[in-house]
Amino acid sequence: MTDVLSEHFKEQAAEALGNATIQESLDRLVNFRQGRVDAIAEYGQERWDALSQSAREIKRETLEHLDYYLDELSRNVERAGGHVFFARDAAEANEYVAKVAADNGVKTVIKSKSMVSEEMGIADVLEAMGIEPVETDLGEYIIQLAREAPYHIIAPALHKSKEEVSELFERILGTPAESDITALAGVARKVLREKFLEADMGMTGANFGVAETGTIVMVTNEGNGRMCSSLPRVHVATMGMERVIPRLRDVATYLPLLTRSATGQRISSYVSFVTGPRRSGEEDGPQEFHLVILDNGRSRMLADPELREALYCIRCGACLNACPVYGKVGGHAYGWVYPGPIGAVVTPSLVGVPKAKDLPFASTLCGACRDVCPLKIDIPRMLLKLRSDAVEGPPETRVPRSVESLMMRAWRKTVAGPRLFTLAGKVTSAAQWPLSRQGVLRWLPPPLSGWTRTRDFPRAAMRPFRARWRKDGGSRGG
Amino acid sequence: MAQKSVSLFVTCLVDQFYPEVGEATVRLLRHLNVEVDFPADQTCCGQVALNGGYRSHATAVAKRFIEVFRNSETIVAPSGSCVATIHTHYADLLRGYPELAAEVASLQARTYELSQYLVDVLGVEDVGAHLPSPTRVTYHDCCHALRDLGVGAQPRKLLSAVDGAELAEMKDSASCCGFGGTFAVKFADISSAILREKLRNVEVTGASVLTAVDSSCLMHMGGALRRQGSRTRAVHLAELLCEGIEGERA
Ligand code: SF4
């Protein structure tokens, strides 16, 4: 599995906040946001809401009978001549893919963008076997050369300026410096063209797996997914087990939601449907087709009624674009494959709360993510659930936080009744005198010092509201 | 018209830090012929604990809240986020007390954020306020008021009707100010970065008053405005409206 660096959220966020190039790239998110707004306006809000409602309905139904649909999917893939492997975790999935590659004497693998394969960390496994994995989507290719993780769900190299990309190409591919984006894409295309021809195995993700027909659906903008799935002898597709949908016609429900939420496109440039390997008489397509369906903690989420809805996610990235926190710290701060609000739910759920302890707390709970989500996933509510797992949950999910829980216990006693509450107010207002100036506090000791670095803090009232009310017999304010 | 009466939930923050906001709320309501009482045993809605992950504490506080306000016909609070806590989380928090389910539902239906109460329940859009001198005002949509309660039009209606106030909309008024409770302390630098962007949008409007329906967001934004020595004041909507009716009182 790809290394989880989510424990270092704070340091990673600080780095991003101090990096001017990153801040500039994050400002470009406004284009995605506007794209989405325009696309929905064009579609019509009412129609949009109806579509979104049916998408939820389909997901609810599918997840309730997940075993049934996965079984149907797998039977139909096999009927079409493909192989299906259910992997409990990343290690099992990697082992299976490695074996397919070894059995076929594979030397080069061309890959198309897939978060599940990132989650597995398959590229490292292949490399260790002496096999060259090559990302073929421009953004993915750039971050592969830079040896970085994807930055954004749909724009993996969002954080790189064209100057940085040019420098990277120069350094690694030895190509001359280029300042034009189209020219840079041309450079990559030339290098990749050879890889396409030479590869013996292609790996892709699957946006949807259609149970009814055993078809996987890939939504891409560069067409490389299509090349990866049709050119080499072997095609291995990977998908999370929640990506199954019952019927072919359900694609028509999800597709507009996905592309319009992601970038504002009516439809993406390429939508490919793959059902099994090449059949006799067909001119192209792989000789072998494998579908790896990954659990890796998803059944745990499925079993939790408060987290289950996170499995509705179609990875459109709209919540990232809308999130004020993602908008400042960017994707790498989150430290794993899934960034942003949905990442803050998915990562702790899949890798364990203690390994991602900051993520559920690193949110203002503003609800913008829930508002824009085409599946209306209530992300803030799930963050609260994960917070309570971190604080009050069973030992596996609890994160030690002694000082804070002492303070919280004190607060609980304080608000348990008016008497202590009033007393606490008096103590606070007396204790703050040495610190206050002109009615505000300009400095507070830790853990509140972070606040006063940029903001004055109000002084507690000498006479709180309740005292004023009592004294005036309730006439205060009249 | 029958005399209306409401119970004030002043919120812990307003009680301890901004009692003037509580007083303004009372004056405003009385000015509109609403009788106000103050259940003295009240403390907090539980939001602080809930957001910190202390769900069991939040449950205890929620249970208390129900007991304190059990006999109140209508509850009004000058805080969108506290009212939102009651509306969106009490049912969850009190799931372990099925005997309270009906009471929770009825409590939710009786609890209003101040501007919501004035406009949607009382049907008042003009509180009859006159500001002594022309004032440019910009309104920040607090996240919970807007997204959980649908409060956005109400405060704007009230503001637009104030004589002497000019409502100057800021860019992205609905984007979060970066407060988020303990978030502002735990992730102070991220919070400040979000806040900076918000205040830039405030500044562009040229408004001398920034108003909202939640003292917590105002504490955050106002604290930074003060630190920067800005000429823009952060003022709770209740106070601003009240400033406008003061003259009449004298
Ligand atoms: S949670 Fe919703 S908005 Fe975020 S990526 Fe998933 S589907 Fe898109």
Image (tube, coloured by chain):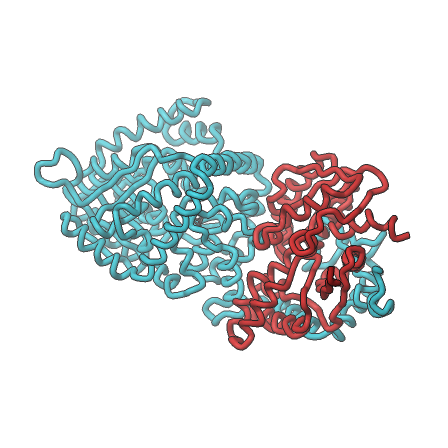
Q: Residue furthest left?
A: A281
Q: The red chain is which one?
A: B
Residue A271, by quadrant, is: top left
Question: Residue B12: x percent and y percent?
Answer: 71, 64
Residue B17 appears in the picture as rendered? yes
Q: Indicate left or right for A228 with A148 as reference.
A: left
Colour in which the image shows chain A: cyan
Q: Indicate left or right for A207 with A396 as reference.
A: left
Question: Residue B65: x percent and y percent?
Answer: 65, 70
Q: Report the front residue among B105 and A371.
A: B105
Residue B18 appears in the picture as rendered? no
Question: Residue A156: x percent and y percent?
Answer: 42, 39
Q: Report the front residue among B5 and A63.
A: B5
Locate the C terminus of chain A by quadrant: bottom right
Q: Which residue lies furthest to the front in this view?
A: B1
Q: Report the front residue among A19 and A37.
A: A37
Going 27% across and 29% down the picture, which residue do you hit? A193
Going 70% across and 72% down the picture, which residue do you hit? A414
Residue B89, by quadrant, is: bottom right
Q: How many labels does the image show?
A: 0
Above or below for B70 versus A27: below
Q: Report the front residue among B221 and B245.
A: B245
Question: Residue A319: x percent and y percent?
Answer: 48, 46
Locate the N terminus of chain A by quadrant: bottom left
